Image: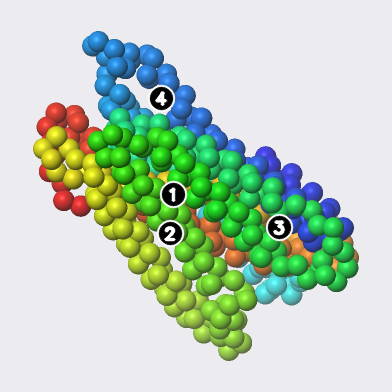
């Protein structure tokens, strides 16, 4: 919140000079916030783990076993979920109510332009973007990352009790590289004006994806190699690759349905020409259609990661294959390995939107408003992409939490717990 409310004015000022500079300012401001969110999740769990490790005398005579220590961290994930619940519901309802209210009063009833300073609801709309899209989405991904780390620590046990922190530490690095790849432009004139912000953001995401694959492979070889199954780390690296591909597919699906350049949004705009009713019907049907592919993608990724983990060669004490559930945990880590860059793209959206409102209220030239309108249109697509990503990661994390719960019951019961997932 602190960053977003200050970046809005700076983006507005940058839009008076060039579209690329406005894009750079908004992306880097969003990137700073995203890196803080992911860093807080990593630092919080690391501090708790270190404190409990020393306080409870882990791996000392009479102390707690290292495999039982992650069970004490569950409260951290529960607290993150509690905060995300109120942030998402409260912030989401507020921002949409303020947005719709401002449009109804301004454009429908009074016939004045969007973000006109004569409409007091515009201020509520601008505040809602910061509350519902910056703070709430940050809390949502914070919860997903925390739940994924802790549940994977429970499922992984001794073999991988440190790997999750390493993965998200790499996330900070690879996402920073993607953010910094979006620099200023030396281009000028018509060529610079025709640069597509969506293409620039996608290039940055591609940089993060490539570096994430490399970092994930290195970290799994470093942290998950075991003499019991020398090739198991490769299977888990492939599980991580499944998660990274899942994230990319989620982004692509949401972009196709939400980007104004593709057919679904065009058909929805065409339906609006015949009235409100056809617009609502077409919009609802399009939303229902959008949810079908992500469900299939999540199902395929969970089954694939489970199979890769189960065929890794790891065996339990009775000789049965194990590692399937941990494979799904690694896939979730892979999906969230670029979470910082995804959150950056999300926070870019409301900053560009609010910059447009500030430009309108301060009566800047039409050319400046044109720049912020283009960034706002791309930002709306990015917000939709992040919502899809957040829901997908939450679905995988909830699967892990259920599995971790069964594992925790078995630990406290001191006997194997039969489960069929």
Closer mark to the observer between disc 4 and disc 2? 2
Please say if the residues under marks 1 and 2 sit with CB atoms less than 8 Å apart: yes
Which residue is nearer to you in this view: 343 or 314? Answer: 314
Which residue is nearer to you in this view: 112 or 280? Answer: 280
Closer mark to the observer between disc 2 and disc 3? 2
Which residue is nearer to you in this view: 293 or 271? Answer: 293
Please say if the residues under marks 4 and 1 sit with CB atoms less than 8 Å apart: no
Q: SS of the residue at dot 3?
A: helix
Mark 2–mark 3 Cα distance, whole angstroms, equals: 28 Å
Q: SS of the residue at dot 2?
A: helix
The x and y percentages for residue 366 are 85, 69
Mark 4–mark 3 Cα distance, whole angstroms, equals: 39 Å
Residue hosting label 2:
246
Mark 4–mark 1 Cα distance, whole angstroms, equals: 22 Å
Please report whichever mark, 1 or 2, sits nearer to the chain's N-terminal start.
Answer: 2
The x and y percentages for residue 213 are 49, 50
Rendered residue at 64%/46% (across/down): 177
Q: Is residue 409 visible?
A: yes
Mark 1–mark 2 Cα distance, whole angstroms, equals: 9 Å
Residue hosting label 4:
49
Q: Which mark is residue 352?
A: 3
The vertical placement of 300 against 42, above or below, is below
The x and y percentages for residue 69 are 31, 25
Residue hosting label 1:
334
């Amino acid at each position: 919140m602190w960053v977003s409310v200050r970046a809005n004015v700076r983006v507005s000022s940058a839009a008076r000079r060039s579209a690329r500079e406005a894009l750079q300012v908004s992306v880097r401001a969003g990137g700073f916030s995203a890196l803080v969110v992911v860093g807080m999740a990593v630092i919080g769990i690391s501090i708790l783990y270190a404190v409990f490790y020393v306080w409870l005398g882990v791996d000392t005579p009479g102390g707690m076993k290292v495999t039982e220590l992650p069970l004490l961290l569950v409260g951290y994930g529960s607290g993150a979920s509690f905060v995300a619940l109120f942030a998402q519901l409260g912030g989401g309802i507020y921002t949409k109510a303020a947005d719709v209210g401002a449009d109804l009063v301004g454009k429908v009833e009074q016939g004045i332009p969007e973000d006109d300073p004569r409409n007091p609801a515009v201020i509520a709309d601008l505040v809602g973007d910061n509350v519902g899209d910056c703070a709430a989405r940050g809390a949502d991904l914070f919860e997903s990352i925390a739940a994924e780390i802790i549940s994977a620590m429970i499922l992984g046990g001794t073999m991988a009790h440190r790997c999750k922190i390493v993965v998200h530490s790499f996330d900070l690095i690879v996402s920073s590289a993607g953010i910094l790849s979006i620099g200023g432009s030396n281009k000028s004139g018509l060529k610079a004006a025709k640069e597509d912000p969506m293409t620039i953001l996608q290039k940055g995401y591609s940089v993060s994806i490539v570096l994430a694959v490399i970092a994930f492979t290195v970290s799994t070889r470093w942290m998950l190699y075991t003499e019991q199954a020398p090739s198991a780390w490769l299977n888990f690296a492939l599980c991580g690759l499944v998660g990274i591909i899942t994230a990319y597919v989620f982004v692509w699906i949401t972009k196709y349905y939400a980007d104004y350049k593709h057919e679904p949004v065009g058909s929805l705009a065409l339906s609006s020409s015949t009235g409100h009713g056809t617009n609502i019907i077409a919009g609802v049907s399009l939303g229902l259609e959008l949810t079908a592919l992500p469900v299939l993608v999540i199902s395929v990724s969970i089954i694939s990661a489970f199979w890769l983990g189960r065929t890794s060669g790891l065996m339990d004490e009775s000789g049965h294959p194990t590692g399937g559930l941990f494979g799904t945990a690694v896939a979730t880590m892979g999906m969230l390995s670029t979470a910082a860059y995804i959150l950056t793209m999300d926070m870019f959206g409301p900053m560009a939107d609010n910059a447009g409102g500030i430009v309108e209220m301060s009566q800047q030239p039409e050319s400046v408003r044109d720049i912020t309108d283009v960034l706002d249109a791309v930002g709306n697509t990015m917000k939709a992409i992040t919502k899809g990503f957040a829901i997908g990661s939450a679905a995988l994390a909830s699967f892990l939490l259920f599995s971790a719960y069964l594992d925790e019951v078995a630990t406290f019961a001191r006997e194997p717990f039969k489960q069929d997932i």
